[in-house]
Image: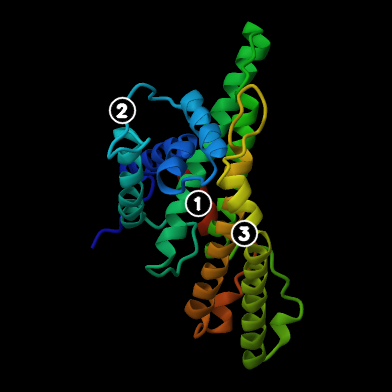
C-alpha cells in the first residue's frame, strides 16, 4: 500500500474554505447573535442591528426564515462543520509530525493546517501593508489590526496543535530518573493541573467573556473596528478547554508506551534533516 504524501492540493483547499467560512461567520457575528442569542433589551438589539448593517458585506440580501441571517450566512454556518469533518478525514500525517496519533488527534492536526494557512495570510497582509506604506505612501486603515487579530488566533490555536504534538515545554530532569509508576503519577498530576486551570479559567470569566464581550459583540473602537474583544476572549476559553481535552487524550494514548518511546532527543538526526530539506524543495 502506497503511503500518502502530505502537502497535496486537498490539504490546501479545505483549510482555505474552512478559514473563509469561519472568517465570514466571525465578521457577521451580529447577524448570528440577533437570530440565535437575541437581547432582551431593545436598546441593545437596536445597537447590534445597527452594527450588523454597518459591517454587513452582503448588504441588501433578505434574511431567511424571518431572521437577520441571509443565505450566505446560513451557507457558511452549515458548511463549517462539514468542512471540519472533511478536513479531518483529508489530513495526511507529515513525516516530521509526532508519529503516533489516534482518530481524536485528527481534529488538532486539521486545526494545525488551518493555523499554517493563517500564518501565510498574516504574512501576505503585512507585506501588502509594507508595499502600500513605503512604496505608494498610501497605508491602509485595516492591515495592522487584521494582522494583530489573525496573530491572536494563531497564538491560541497553535497551542492546541503543540499539545497534540507533545512539543510544548517540558522539564525532564527529575522525570527521567523516576520509576515507571511515579512517572505515571506525574503525568496524571500534570494533566489534572491543566484541567483544573481550564475549569477555573472558564468558571471565573465565563460571564464576563460571553455575556459582555461576545453577546454585546464588543468592537476594537478604531477606524477598521474589528471585533477583537468579542472573538479573541471567548476563543481563549474555548482553546483552554480543547487543550485540556487534548491533554487527557495524550495521557490515555501514551499510558502504555515504554519510556524509550517518550524520551526522544532534541537533536535533529540525519533522517529528519533530509525530511526538512525535501519539504522546502532543497536538494
For label 2, count other residues whose C-alpha is less than 10 Å away and answer few (under 14), some (14-19) or many (20+): few
Q: Residue at x 52, y 69 (%)?
A: 245
Identify the image quadrant of residue 204: bottom right
The answer to whether 211 is drawn above or below residue 223 in the figure is below
The residue closer to the viewer here, 1 or 104, is: 104
Q: Residue furthest top?
A: 136
Q: Pointer 1: what residue?
A: 274
Disc 2 and disc 3 in contact, CB within 8 angstroms: no
In x, y percent, where is residue 133?
A: 66, 13
The residue closer to the viewer here, 113 or 83, is: 83
Q: Mark 2, mark 1: which one is toward the viewer?
A: 2
Disc 2 is placed on an element classified as loop
Q: Image quadrant for the N terminus?
A: bottom left
Q: Residue at x 57, y 40 (%)?
A: 217
Q: Pointer 3: what residue?
A: 206
In x, y percent, where is residue 45?
A: 51, 38
Identify the image quadrant of residue 136: top right
Q: Mark 2, mark 3: which one is toward the viewer?
A: 2
The answer to whether 266 is drawn above or below residue 94 in the figure is below
For label 3, count other residues whose C-alpha is less than 10 Å away and answer few (under 14), some (14-19) or many (20+): some
The answer to whether 8 is drawn above or below residue 239 in the figure is above
Disc 3 is placed on an element classified as helix
Q: Mark 1, mark 3: which one is toward the viewer?
A: 3
Q: Is residue 281 visible?
A: no
Res 62 label: 2
The answer to whether 95 is drawn above or below residue 74 in the figure is below
In x, y percent, where is residue 96?
A: 49, 57
- Mark 2 to mark 1: distance in Å? 55 Å
Amino acid at each position: 500500500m502506497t503511503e500518502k504524501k502530505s502537502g497535496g492540493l486537498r490539504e490546501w483547499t479545505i483549510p482555505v474554505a474552512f478559514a473563509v467560512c469561519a472568517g465570514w461567520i466571525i465578521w457577521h457575528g451580529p447577524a448570528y447573535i440577533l437570530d440565535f442569542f437575541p437581547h432582551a433589551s431593545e436598546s441593545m438589539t437596536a445597537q447590534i442591528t445597527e452594527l450588523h448593517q454597518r459591517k454587513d458585506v452582503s448588504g441588501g440580501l433578505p434574511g431567511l426564515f424571518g431572521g437577520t441571517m441571509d443565505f450566505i450566512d446560513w451557507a457558511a454556518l452549515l458548511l463549517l462543520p462539514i468542512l471540519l469533518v472533511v478536513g479531518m478525514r483529508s489530513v495526511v500525517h507529515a513525516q516530521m509530525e509526532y508519529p503516533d496519533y489516534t482518530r481524536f488527534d485528527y481534529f488538532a492536526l486539521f486545526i494545525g493546517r488551518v493555523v499554517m494557512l493563517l500564518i501565510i495570510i498574516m504574512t501576505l497582509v503585512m507585506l501588502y501593508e509594507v508595499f502600500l506604506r513605503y512604496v505608494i505612501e498610501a497605508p491602509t486603515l485595516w492591515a495592522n489590526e487584521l494582522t494583530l487579530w489573525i496573530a491572536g488566533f494563531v497564538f491560541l490555536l497553535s497551542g492546541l496543535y503543540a499539545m497534540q504534538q507533545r512539543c510544548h515545554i517540558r522539564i525532564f530532569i527529575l522525570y527521567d530518573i523516576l520509576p515507571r509508576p511515579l512517572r505515571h503519577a506525574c503525568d496524571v498530576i500534570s494533566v489534572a493541573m491543566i484541567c483544573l486551570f481550564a475549569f477555573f479559567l472558564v468558571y471565573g470569566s465565563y460571564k464576563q467573556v460571553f455575556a459582555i464581550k461576545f453577546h454585546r459583540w464588543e468592537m476594537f473602537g478604531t477606524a477598521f473596528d474589528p471585533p477583537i474583544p468579542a472573538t479573541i476572549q471567548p476563543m481563549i476559553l474555548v482553546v483552554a478547554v480543547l487543550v485540556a481535552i487534548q491533554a487527557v487524550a495524550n495521557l490515555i494514548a501514551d499510558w502504555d508506551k515504554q519510556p524509550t518511546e517518550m524520551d526522544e532527543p532534541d537533536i535533529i538526526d540525519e533522517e529528519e534533516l533530509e525530511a526538512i530539506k525535501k519539504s522546502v524543495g532543497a536538494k
